[in-house]
Amino acid sequence: MVGWLARLVLVLSVLGVLALDGFAWASGRVTTQDRAEAAGRAASSAYAVTADVQRAYDAALAEVSGQGDTIDPATFTAAADGTVTLTLASEASTLVLHRVPRLEHLTRFRATVTTAPSP
């Protein structure tokens, strides 16, 4: 009697961990794009006011600070019309996936966005 119950608990525990990792992965994928767009809007607004690429980049970084995201300076561009293009990189916080060397790359996401200044 204990044998089947122990197996059931073990199987349900493994399925629960896999479900949590799947949710964390999906959430990381979606929020990376959202945070990239927010950083792009902040950079566009800053560039529209200051016309300074460094201040626009700093505004984008400030928007995503504290979330572990990075913005690749090589991909950050600001056009004369205030349009900003940037690439944001983030990593999903998973329970198991990031600990498996062959699967770790699946937890890293990149989103490239181009945003125009608000009218």
Image (cartoon, rainbow, N blue to C red):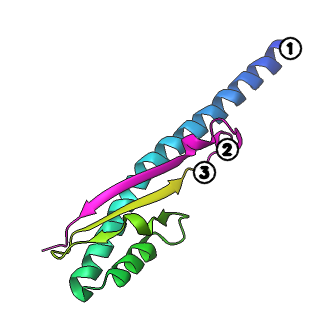
Magenta residue span: 93-119
Q: Is residue 59 left or right of residue 23?
A: left
| Residue 56 in picture, x, y percent from top left | 34, 79
* The C terminus - image quarter: bottom left
Q: Is residue 17 left or right of residue 63?
A: right
Q: Earlier in the sequence, mark 1 or mark 3?
A: 1
Quadrant in which residue 40 is drawn: bottom left
Task: Provide the residue designation for mark 2.
Answer: 95
What amino acid type is highlighted by mark number 2? Leu
Label 3, secondary structure: give it.
loop
What amino acid type is highlighted by mark number 3? Ser
What amino acid type is highlighted by mark number 1? Gly
Label 1, secondary structure: give it.
helix
Q: Is residue 12 above or below residue 54?
A: above
Q: Is residue 31 left or right of residue 68?
A: left
Q: Is residue 17 above or below residue 67?
A: above
- As drawn, the label of residue 93 is 3
